[in-house]
Amino acid sequence: MPGPGDQTSAAEGRNHGDLRASHADRERVIGTLKAAYVEGRLTEDELDARVGQVYASRTYAELAEVTAEVTADIPAELAGARSARDPWRATKIAWRIEYAIVLPGIVAVLLLPSGPRTSVATVVISTTVVYLIFWILGVSLMISSRPPKRSGGQLPPRSAPGAGG
């Protein structure tokens, strides 16, 4: 069984087995081993031993050796499936930082009363109020936009093939 990334390399006519594996690749292989344990393909002792081998592995080829026997009868499209990662994740984080720090500061400066009688207390209070409003709105938006949790980490039941529905 090819290791992480080896399927695309085989299609391109190259072998990436000698490339160093990342921490994310190791975690993905450990997830595969845990799934095999849950399915009864591995005992607990075998799982522990293989997890130790995964952490000792440095290349894709070494990772592939750890899972070769366990995943031999799993179809290639299932074994090579990767979890989807949001390509806009970094941009979203940057916007959250801007929303939480920069934008409230600009609004606070714009809302400050001007003139010779503006005290430090007025500046501090208005800035604090603006920041609190922005943070409350931001937290409520993040909470309301969270995806719902699945109970027990299980997928929803699927209907049987050929069943009307």
Image (tube, helix red, strand yellow):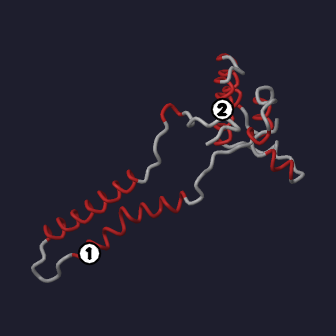
Q: CA distance from mark 1 to mark 2?
A: 51 Å
Q: Label 1: which residue?
A: 109
Above or below 17: residue 131: below
Amino acid type at mark 1: Val
User: Picture quarter containing residue 117?
Assistant: bottom left
Query: Residue lying farthest right?
Result: 13
Question: Is residue 135 found left or right of 92 in the rendered image?
Answer: left
- Tell which of 16 and 164 is nearer to you: 164
Question: Is residue 121 found left or right of 68 in the rendered image?
Answer: left
Residue visible at 69% across and 35% down? 29
- Tell which of 130 and 76 is nearer to you: 76
Residue visible at 58% across and 35% down? 157
Residue visible at 80% across and 44% down? 6
Q: Label 2: which residue?
A: 30
Q: Secondary structure at mark 2?
A: helix
Question: Is residue 107 found left or right of 13 in the rendered image?
Answer: left
